[in-house]
Amino acid sequence: MARVALVTGGTRGIGAAVSIALKNAGYTVAANYAGNDEAAAEFKKETGIAVYKWNVGDFDACGEGIKQIEAELGPIDVLVNNAGVTRDAMLHKMSKQQWDDVLNVDLTSVFNMCRHLIDGMRERNFGRIINMTSINGQKGQMGQTNYSAAKAGMIGFTKALAQETAKKGITVNVIAPGYINTEMVAAVPEKVLESIIATIPVGRLGEPEDIARGVVYLAADDAGFITGSTLTINGAQYIAG
């Protein structure tokens, strides 16, 4: 029986590529989304992947969503925490709401999802948790103290949970994408985008599929000896020690 994988923010951008790659690798995939019903419906129509709507920043909503998926598809063995938002501003202009929105969706959601799934994974002695951080969680980024803090926090969370669950057959890893060719990046002014690409040694933006291939690798049954690690996929733009 195919393992069930849940991808948060799984109907657009990197998340959509991850959902499709996992399906192609033989998983039964559930894609979570927060608000774009039209995009989610189109994604489901095109891929046949089941979609589920809830706010990952809401602890109780996460629990209800997970219960529905497991009732319909079976126990979730693979979790990809991909959902995220940005609310950019320099700190001296950042509102409390901008800070809270990003920390809630980008970091607290990781606790919410993992907390609801970890008991089942421990009981089954198997689990794969893959947390999607960012190059800006590794190096920081001006105008993104909220986002950089959330994404850096995700790395610390991953390292701690990996130690807690290693003996239970559960791996917990991070993927840190660089600048990826998504709608969000495509909306950047052309001159700014050119300046970004100039800092990437491979000379191009990454593609969502570049990230998805990393997820498929970490999700595999035979990837049981890699845990607590950060897989950096950024074209050598930033090389973490």
Image (tube, grey):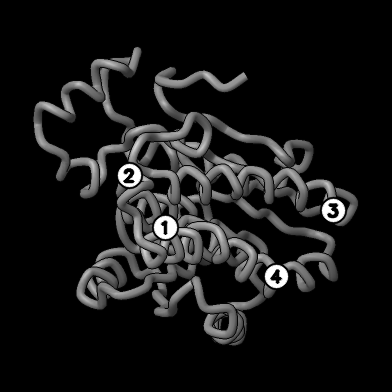
> Which residue is pictured at 62% across the width and 19% down the height?
241
Query: Residue 4: image x %, image y %?
Result: 59, 67
Within the image, what quadrant is residue 55 found in? Answer: bottom left
In the depicted view, which residue is nearer to us: 114 or 196? 196
Say which mark, if any, is on residue 115. 4
Q: Which residue is mark 1?
A: 84
Q: Is residue 141 visible?
A: yes
Sequence-wise first label, 4 or 2: 2
Location of mark 3 (residue) = 164
Q: Which residue is mark 2?
A: 90
Labels 2 and 3: the sequence-earlier one: 2
Q: Residues within 10 Å of mark 2 (few under 14, many from 20)?
A: few
At horizontal 64% and vertical 65% (from top left) the residue drawn is 111
Cα separation between marks 3 and 1: 25 Å
- Give the mark nearer the N terminus: 3 vs 4: 4
Q: The disc labelled 4 sits on which kind of residue?
A: Arg
Residue lying furthest front? 92
Rendering quarter of residue 208:
top left
